[in-house]
Amino acid sequence: MLAIEQRNAAGGILGRPIELLVQDDGQNSVQAMEAVRALVDANVDVVVGPFTSAMTAAVLPQMNQARVVIISPTIAGEEFVGKDDYLFRINAAAVTNAGNYAQMLKLRGVHKVGLVYDLDNRKFTESWSKAFEAAFASIGGRVVAAVPFESNREPAFGALVAKALVGKPDGLVFLATPVDTARLAQQSSKMAPGLAMATSEWAASENLLELGGPAVEGMLTLRVYNRDDPSERTRLFLEAYQARFSRAPGDSAVAAYDAATALMEALVRKSSGESLKEALIRYGPFEGLQQPILFDANGDTNRTMYFTEIRAGRYALVK
């Protein structure tokens, strides 16, 4: 919304305003397909989203058939990498991020990990957990418990943490939404106070801080941008976002802003008769908030990510 409003205030695209149509996938595959069908029927030029790998898997066949570009700010599932289709990704691949977590936890003295992951987004969590386990094992670490759950079934979070602690790990890793990560951290702080904790980039949001409170202190997570970047561009973005929405942006908001920025610039640069897919591949890199966005021939990117640790209720950059 912010990227489009700023672009329209500056004259739109070649003098024409951009219209934003919104549909909710409801984190339900049937609803997601209906939402995409409505957008395609409305003759949209591009779709920004979905935000989970599960919903992307549900709607991608429709988008490929309609030949409409779909640009996801956040998905990282391995099955979407290296495919010549109409999907473009802003986020780094799960295997890359998971490998970076393995290295960072080992550097921090964690040798045994208990893993809890949400099957309702299995396209992401299963590929992430497998990549993490392989990378961690390659440097002498070990996943002593891998505990799946389904968030839509209202799980008992204490029981999940208890299962993850059976192998006496020296660290816990959660692959879940910000809300469920906060719940898991609260149980962990009761059952194993002081144990190292990490959560995947999926949970990196302001909601995690608000809901987790003291329980998430010390938690390690990757973020898609550096909140403490001193550049003028970042300062102006943060001020504009705060003024527009009365809150600080989460990672998905920044990634969505980058996605919208890239696609609008591609629409400006593309020539008559050239498709948006061709333009996104041909005319990069596009200037993102803090780093250039360059898509390869399959619509994939290599994004720089930033490790943070929650300290005093905020994300502090790990240097």
Image: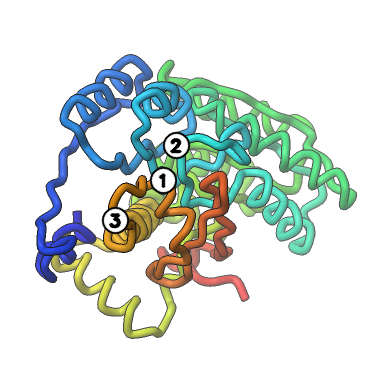
| Rendered-image quadrant of the C terminus | bottom right
Q: Is residue 191 visible?
A: no
- 46 relative to 195 in the view: left or right: left
- Quadrant of the rendered image containing residue 131: top right
Marked residue nearer the N-terminal end (1 or 3): 3
Q: Which residue is mark 2?
A: 86
Identify the secondary structure beneath mark 3. helix
Measured along the vertical axis of the image, is residue 272 above or below residue 291? above
Marked residue nearer the N-terminal end (2 or 3): 2
Residue depicted at 31% across the width and 61% down the height: 261
Measured along the vertical axis of the image, is residue 121 above or below residue 174? above
Between residues 153 and 242, which one lies in front from this camera angle?
242
Amino acid type indicated by mark 1? Lys
Residue depicted at 60% across the width and 40% down the height: 81
Q: Is residue 241 visible?
A: yes
Identify the secondary structure beneath mark 2. loop
CB-based contact (under 8 Å), mark 2 and mark 3: no
Between residues 96 and 178, which one lies in front from this camera angle?
96
Please tell me the numbered disc located at residue 132: none
Residue depicted at 80% across the width and 47% down the height: 136
Q: Residue 10 in the image: x percent, y percent?
A: 13, 71
Rounded to the nearest whole Å, what is the CA distance between mark 2 and mark 1?
7 Å
- Quadrant of the rendered image containing residue 43: top left
Q: Residue 275 in the image: x percent, y percent?
A: 36, 45
Amino acid type indicated by mark 3? Leu
CB-based contact (under 8 Å), mark 2 and mark 1: yes
Colour scheme? rainbow
Measured along the vertical axis of the image, is residue 105 above or below residue 83? below
Rounded to the nearest whole Å, what is the CA distance between mark 2 and mark 3?
15 Å
Q: Which residue is mark 1?
A: 277
Q: Which residue is mark 3?
A: 267
